[in-house]
Image (cartoon, rainbow, N blue to C red):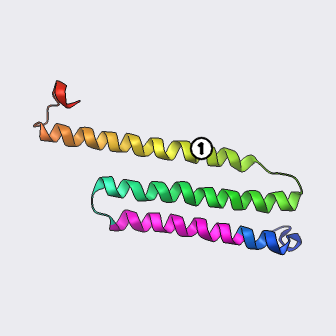
Amino acid sequence: MSGAAELPAWAALLTATLVLIGAAVTLIGSIGLLRLGSFYERAHAPTLGTTLGTGCIVVASMVYFSVLQTRPVMHELLIAIFVAVTTPVTLMLLVRAALYRDRSEDAGGIPGPDRS
């Protein structure tokens, strides 16, 4: 990496810690996807892992590049906002589609007016 030798020890430690925490949270979310039983349980774990893991990695990137460039670097905020908005919305749409499917299967394949 260019400039990594110029990074102060406190910034390197903080960056490494945040990256490891982000990777661990994302890994836990992925394991939850494999271990949990129903679709509704499986949809929850990766969503939290993605949002929190990406958040930690984005903060680590902000710290690293802000210290190296001696000015605040805020480009990563766009990534954080995009992930924080799109991941929960995607989860909501997937769960609504699954609920619709489950309700239409219970009604014999034809959703009625009281089942929408």
Chief secondary structure of the magenta portion: helix
* Residue 64 % position (x, y): 78, 62
Task: Write the start and end of the magenta stretch as one range.
Answer: 16-35
* Residue 35 % position (x, y): 34, 68
As for residue 21 lying within the magenta part, the answer is yes
Q: Amino acid at mark 1?
A: Phe
Q: Is residue 36 above or below residue 103?
A: below
* Residue 109 % position (x, y): 13, 36
Q: Is residue 32 above or below residue 54?
A: below
| Neighbour tally class for label 1: few under 14, some 14-19, many 20 plus, Cα within 10 Å | few
As for residue 95 lying within the magenta part, the answer is no
Which picture quadrant has residue 112? top left
- Residue on which disc 1 sits: 82
The furthest residue to the left: 108
The C terminus appears in which quarter of the rendering? top left
Which picture quadrant has residue 78? top right
